[in-house]
Amino acid sequence: MNCDRVLFLLNGYVDGELDLVTSLEIEEHLRGCAACSAQQRSLAALHAATADKALYHAAPAALEQRIRGSLKKASPQPPFWSRFTWRWLAPAAALVVILILIAGTLGRSWMLANQQTRLAQEVQTAHVRSLMPNHLMDVASSDQHTVKPWFNGKLDFSPPVTDLAAEGFPLVGGRLDYLDGRQVAALVYRRNKHYINLFIWPSPDGGLGLQRSTYNGYHLFHWNQAGMTFWAVSDVNPDDLLAFIHAYQKNTQ
Amino acid sequence: MSVEQDKQARFEQVILPHIDAAYNLARWIVNNDQDAEDIVQESFLRAFKYFASYQGGNSRSWLLTIVRNMCYDWMHQNRGQGQAVELDDEIAEDEAGAGDPETFLQLKIDHQMVASALEKLPAQYRELIVLRELEEMSYKEIALIAGIPIGTVMSRLARARDRLKACLGRRQDEEGAHEL
């Protein structure tokens, strides 16, 4: 191992981040090289000086109490009298619920069709908008370990992220978007010169098999899986989009 | 226990214990006690709001990612600083190499000097040193929190340390000059 390489790896060595073989090679070099050995000692001295606990700023005592107080304010307690009213209303409520269920089942299939069309329109619009300059990504990275945690603290759910470069659909980044009245995750993949948007958000509906819709000439697919709804849209031909979906589903089981 | 009370209890059990780590990071990034307190309070509120996205795993890293982002958002709004690294022309010549190690080894350093030198570093260098040395985090954890690849953690940390050494060397020179 030469000096350049040792100096390049020196911080990793001092921090104990390197594998055993590499560490041993570095130690062997240090034994025989005064210059690098001096660098290592200098770095170790700095490490010791900066790992000094006197530098640690612990939270002021009152801060924890203030935070507990504001957490309590942030989660309102249900009013105590709600327990009593339920007993009085129960029989009447049950009847109303049955009537609603009957009417609901009839209206549901019609509503569902409308809802899907509206959602397909929203998804297609969001896709086209994302293709405008500088609208595609909030975080640009092909590393799923960068994209997935980027959503932490920005969404109230954690989208499954995986890179599919091996299957011909590299991950290029992620973005926050807004669909169906809520914030959603958008994962951006590339297929040759085209982009695929995969929108993800939590859904209480159960496992819905793959559904296909078209809107404005675009092919869209959607499905439910593991408590989330997925919508995939792209300019690529539907066969490629299907291949992408199968690869994604396979890699996120 | 209601669902709401359940959520708060679980949050206080899993996330709140990291309050020192949260404050330490915020304080070192923004260099001010009061601002750090405000940011930490906001961070916990936000973490609570998005608690459903915490799926187990490293709770400290999850929280500190939120705290770190809050710090930079706050600095952008309140100090007009984006992700831009502050420039310090004095140090430029020391950037070229690791500097003379023997000189550094001769320095007498106390923690006040280190604190003072750390405060002068650009925030994006300083945060790496804080996470590595004071929070004792691995490169992998640091990479997650700072949103950079692991290789970048090592190289940026190396540059941060070079700058710190140069800064400490200069401070020693200044103090030596005063004694004369």
Image (tube, helix red, strand yellow):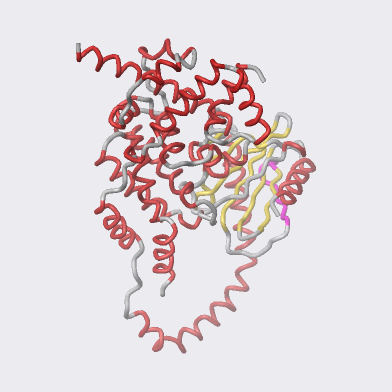
Quarter where residue B167 is shown:
top left
Side of A61 relative to B57 (left or right): left
Question: Horizontal and vertical percent for residue B37?
Answer: 28, 45
Question: Horizontal and vertical percent for residue B114?
Answer: 33, 29
Name the residue located 38 percent from the left edge and 25 percent from the top edge: B122
Q: Is residue A150 above or below residue B79?
A: below
Q: In the rendered image, which quarter contains the C terminus of chain B?
A: top left
Q: In the rendered image, which quarter contains the N terminus of chain B?
A: bottom left
Question: Horizontal and vertical percent for residue A216?
Answer: 66, 42
Question: Horizontal and vertical percent for residue A239?
Answer: 80, 43
Name the residue located 46 percent from the left edge and 23 percent from the top edge: A42
Q: Residue furthest front?
A: A31
Name the residue located 62 percent from the left edge and 41 percent from the top edge: A144
Side of A120 relative to B31 (left or right): right
Quarter where residue B129 is shown:
top left
Question: Between A192 and A94, which is closer to the camera in this rendering?
Answer: A192
Q: Is residue B155 above or below residue A92?
A: above
Q: Kindly report the secondary structure that dominates the magenta region of the rendered protein.
A: strand
Q: Is residue A129 above or below residue A65?
A: above
What is the total number of numbered labels drawn onto the structure image? 0
Q: Is residue B172 above or below residue A88?
A: above
- The residue stretch that appears in magenta: A210-218
Q: Residue furthest right?
A: A239
Question: Between A224 and B21, which is closer to the camera in this rendering?
Answer: B21
